[in-house]
Image (cartoon, grey):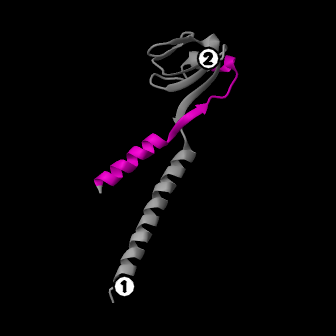
Amino acid sequence: MKIPSLLTVTLLIAGCTSMQPIDGSPADLRLHINSGELLKTGDRVLIVTTDGTTHRFTVKSAGAGRIDGASESIRLEQISALKKRQFSRGKTIALVGGLLGGASLGLFIYGFAEYAGAFALR
């Protein structure tokens, strides 16, 4: 029973997040990043800069006019759009529903096969 539970928890953790766009003008984004309320160390982000380049990385530090990743750094005035990996309620519901539906269907088919096999032996 431990392995199915561990597998379920692992799937839930992996399937419950997605890149969500952060609403606001570039000026609003800069303000919230500099204040430290929008990004934290370890956040996974997708940033589109004013030149149209897309950057995807894990935040090492944010504030003081820049966002730093492991191998790149972006000045806040270059940011035109930002997406951040966040919890997704819809994906979580779909994952749990799919797991429960699949398990229910499997049990139904197993029960039907057992009943049919027992009936055939009579």
Residue 38 can be seen in this image = no
Quarter occupied by the N terminus: bottom left
Q: Amino acid at mark 1?
A: Ala
Name the residue: 49% across, 26% down: 43
Looking at marks 1 and 2 on the same chain, the residue that comes earlier in the sequence is marked by 2
> Is label 2 in a helix, a strand or a loop?
loop
Residue at image location 56% in from the left, 12% down from the top: 74
Question: Which type of secondary structure does the marked residue at label 1 adopt?
Answer: helix
The range drawn in magenta is 2-31
Q: Is residue 75 above or below residue 39?
A: above
26 drawn magenta: yes
Amino acid on which disc 2 is placed: Thr
Question: Is 27 placed above or below 10 here?
Answer: above
Q: Nearer the viewer, mark 1 or mark 2?
A: 1
Residue furthest out toward the left: 2
Residue at coordinates 51% horizontally, 38% vertically from top-left? 17
Residue that appears at 29% across and 53% down: 2
Q: Is residue 69 left or right of residue 31?
A: left
Rendering coords of residue 12 (x, y %): 44, 46
Question: Callout 2: few (<14), some (14-19), or many (20+) C-alpha neighbours within 10 Å?
Answer: few
Name the chief secondary structure element in magenta: helix
Asked whether the viewer can see residue 8, the reply is yes
Residue 14, by quadrant, is top left
Q: Which mark is residue 98?
A: none
Check the picture and name the quadrant holding the C terminus.
bottom left
Query: Which residue does the numbered mark 1 point to in the structure image?
Result: 120
Of residues 116 and 50, the one nearer the viewer is: 116
Write down the residue under mark 2: 53
